[in-house]
Amino acid sequence: MDGDWARALAIGAYMLRATQPGVGGPIQSGLMETHRRVVTEGQGYCGDFVEVFTAIALASGLEVRTWAFSFDGFGGHGHTFNEVWDRALNAWRMIDVFNNYYFVDTQGEPLSAADFHQCLVRGETYDFIPVLPTARPGFAIEAKAREYYNRGADQWYQWWGNNVFSYDRSPLVRLAGMGPRFLSQLAAIVSGVHPRMHILRTPKNSEWVSGMVQVRRRVIGAAIAAGLGTSLLIAAGCLWFQGASMNLTKAL
């Protein structure tokens, strides 16, 4: 097997070569240190794995993007993963390196993120395939994995932006990175290098989306009323949903 998808699987296998990947908390460091700790020590959260995979994929000439879902009404608790464009098949392919999975249909064809999402919402059949068979799976019990992905089915969103190198090189992000993680995220929003959040709309998530829009309006209104309508204050108020300008995408 060769081509874009084979390269994506090879990158995933390279990242999973540590004896016990996916242990410990978030790394909260620059790209090079995050790469070292993911690959050699197996540390990091899903976001760290996505960041490293994105960087390596871009450096190797792949087109890659990031999806995520939450469990708390888009409040920040959830999971994130990648999708790679396969030029030979003219299709996207989903890969969840942190959990050591990609997903296939009943014919054994790798699924895109959109296809996998439809399997979840429609109850269609899919199977788990390990990215690296010798590495640990994300869940020891497959039923637990299915419950995990099903639980976030109505809270999917996509990050519109994948240039992890610009993010990592931003002077403001580097300076803020010496403190808590939320400061570097805030700095990224203020400096314009943080990707924006595009929600995949479903009939069941309208209430959550409306609540996010209302919070954003209240924050902007309060900033204007106080005479402090700076992008910094707006970004701080909107930080919890990771985007000062939220766009909504209809369900595919």
Image (cartoon, helix red, strand yellow):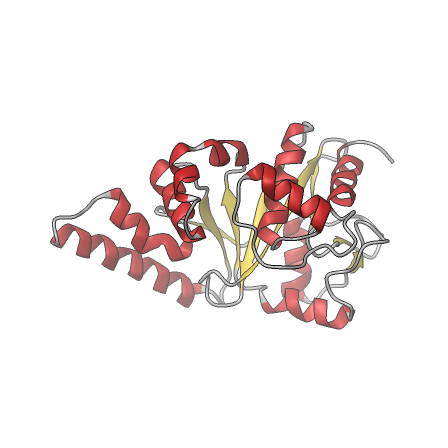
Judge by depth and name the residue closer to the eye, 65 or 98.
Answer: 98
- Would residue 245 be visible to someone looking at this image? yes
- Would residue 252 be visible to someone looking at this image? no
Give the residue displayed 36% in from the left and 36% down from the top.
191
Counting from the top left corner in percent of width and height, residue 236 is at: 31, 52
Q: From the viewer's perspective, is residue 251 above or below residue 83?
A: below
Judge by depth and name the residue closer to the eye, 206 or 217.
Answer: 217
Q: Give the number of callouts.
A: 0
Counting from the top left corner in percent of width and height, residue 54 is at: 62, 39
Give the residue displayed 61% in from the left and 46% down from the top.
50
Judge by depth and name the residue closer to the eye, 84 or 116.
Answer: 84
Q: From the viewer's perspective, is residue 150 above or below residue 2?
A: below
Left or right of 69 in this view: 132: right
Q: From the viewer's perspective, is residue 147 above or below residue 42?
A: below
Judge by depth and name the residue closer to the eye, 203 or 176.
Answer: 176
Counting from the top left corner in percent of width and height, residue 41 is at: 70, 50
Give the residue displayed 83% in from the left and 57% down from the top.
106
Left or right of 8 in this view: 230: left
Give the residue displayed 79% in from the left and 39% down from the top.
10
Q: Quadrant of the N terminus?
A: top right
User: For residue 65, what is the image quadrant?
Assistant: top right
Counting from the top left corner in percent of width and height, residue 91 is at: 70, 39
